[in-house]
Structures are given as structure tokens and as C-alpha cells.
Image (spheres, rainbow, N blue to C red):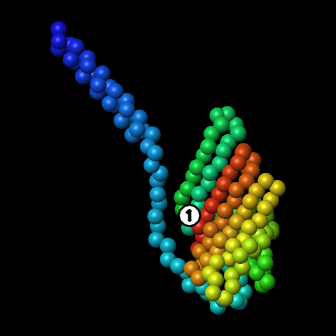
Amino acid sequence: MARPVVRILLLMLLSALAGFYGSRFLQRDEQAELRIPLADATPSRPAGQNLDLGCKEVVEATAQETVFDPKSAIARSGLGTDSAAIHILPDKKMVTVLFAYDVSNGATEGQSLNVKYPPRDADTYLVAAGEGTLSVYSLILNLKTMKAVYTFTGQGMLGIKGYSTLMLCH
């Protein structure tokens, strides 16, 4: 009589352990991390000259919500696929960013950003930002390494969304 009770208790214990650890295994809290080599670019022109840059996305990430049923949150990241043109006005008060994807969809003008932190003699960074009706754009450009981060946060067609990309410019 004791053997069936021991078997049942053992099976219950194994079932509880499988349920506890199985759910932990299936719903991991870890985030995936992608690391790729990224060397600094060498500026192709001396500082202070024409600041028209061509940039290639290295990595990108998006986060967004959907307002359709079932309402959900979506996150994506990976290697970048787009290219961008960055034009810095000679007075360094305005920056325009235009992505190839936008051009392929009929855009002819880029997003205009006001320079908030212009580069000075020893400074490395240029910081620019702009606002739309329901959106915020920003660009941080390291003029020594020729790397840039561009971000967008705002209202999309299906809900709130955010986008960020790391670019290598020349």
C-alpha cells in the first residue's frame, strides 16, 4: 500500500518541478544580444569643410504597439538595411536626414533637425533634435569616429512606436 502512495507523491513532485522549471525555460527573461565588429571610419574630408554625409545603418531596433485585437507590443532588432544622407548646413544650426527607404516611397525632403549642441573646436559631437505633431526625432553624430545614432519616437498608424539606428558615415 505504501508503494503506490510513494509513486504518486514522487510523480506529483516531478510534475511540480517540471511545471516550475519548464515555464521558466519557456519564458526566459534574458534578452538576446548581437555583437558585430565596428571599426571607426576615417573622415574623408578635413573638419570644417562640406558636411554632406552618406551613412549606412549598422544595427537598428524598433518597439511599437498595435491597437488592433489582440492588442500587443512588438519589438524587433537586427542588422541595419537602410542608408541615409545627412546634410549639415554651413552655419551648423540645422541638419537634414533623408533615408533611402523614404526616397523609395516618394519623399523628396528629409527630416529637419535643429542643432542643439554644435561642434566647437575640440568637441567631437553634434546633437540635433526636431519635433513633429506627434513625434520627436534626434541625431547624435560623433565627428571623429563618424558614427551616428538616429532615433524616432511618436505616433504611428497602428499606435505608439519608437525606432533607433546606429549608422557608420563617410
Q: Quadrant of residue 131?
A: bottom right
Percent across and percent down for residue 26 are 42, 38
Percent across and percent down for residue 129 are 74, 67
Query: Disc count in the image?
Result: 1
Residue sticking out furthest to the top: 1
Q: Which residue is mark 1?
A: 59
Q: Is residue 25 above or below residue 124?
A: above
In this rendered view, identify the residue nearer to me: 147 or 119: 119
Q: Quadrant of the C terminus?
A: bottom right
Q: Quadrant of the N terminus?
A: top left
Name the residue rendered at 54%, 58% in the picture.
78
Percent across and percent down for residue 126 are 68, 77
Name the residue rendered at 67%, 88% in the picture.
121
Q: Quadrant of residue 72?
A: top right
Q: Is residue 125 left or right of residue 128?
A: left
Mark 1 secondary-structure assignment:
strand
Q: Is residue 21 left or right of residue 67?
A: left
Name the residue rendered at 64%, 75% in the picture.
141
